[in-house]
Image (cartoon, grey):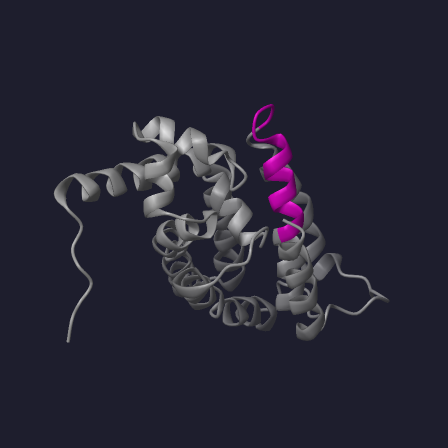
Amino acid sequence: MTGTRPLRADAARNRDKLLVAATQVFGERGIDAPLEEIARRAGVSIGTLYNHFPTRQAFFDAIFPERLAALDRMAAQALADPDPWNGFVGFLHALFALQAQDHGLNDALARRFPVTGEANDACHSGLTQLDRIIERAKESGQLRDDFEPQDLATLVWAMSQVIREAMEAAPQAWRRCLAFFLDGMRAGAAHPIAEPPLTRVQLAEVTRASASRT
């Protein structure tokens, strides 16, 4: 059985330089950052870039699985907190702080591009624990009973936009915005909401529509 031929030493070095540069550039400027800037920062030609990463998606698939794996650690920490509300709040703060530090990751979690392959698996793995984080907070009587995982998805979309638009002028603005959201999620502040949460089918449709527009 023939395996994949290993890269020559110089080609491997160029690939590593491109990954480092892409991580920096996407982190600073989001997923729309020009590939030419990545090539310039890596010190290679745009042709070399395309030889290693023929599409923008190829960069995402190489970079984001490892970065999205942080969601697993954050979720485990939230579930280990003896106070379910503190675990829930701590997870949200950690999530949005991570998004504010890495604007490419912010775009990824907002599903501004189709998340596929290993990146999708890593994202799904971290987020599958969210149901339990939410349920614990509801069972403790601290999180309003009508809050659903789909509502958290819409919160992520909203906060990702705050982070994206304020990244230059007010990079910590998301913290104040989140504080208002959290007060509205407390059981003691709850009032009946006429509009039901998105169904999982609707959530999937909205996500696909959003990704298709990028």
Point out the residue furthest to the top here: 169
Span of residues in magenta: 157-170
Point out the residue furthest to the right here: 194
Question: Is residue 61 visible in the rendered structure shown here?
Answer: yes
Which is nearer the eye, 186 or 55? 55
Q: Is residue 103 left or right of residue 180?
A: left
Q: Residue at x 55, y 58 (%)?
A: 114
Residue 159 percent coordinates (x, y)? 63, 45
Residue 48 percent coordinates (x, y)? 32, 38
Which is nearer the eye, 167 or 86? 167
Magenta stretch holds residue 184: no
Residue 31 percent coordinates (x, y)? 51, 42
Question: Is residue 147 visible in the rendered structure shown here?
Answer: no
Q: Is residue 187 left or right of residue 22?
A: right
Magenta stretch holds residue 169: yes
Residue 12 percent coordinates (x, y)? 20, 44
Q: Residue at x 79, y 70 (%)?
A: 196
Q: How many numbered badges does the structure rendering display?
A: 0
Above or below, 125 relative to 101: below
Q: Residue at x 26, y 43 (%)?
A: 15
Above or below, 123 relative to 156: below
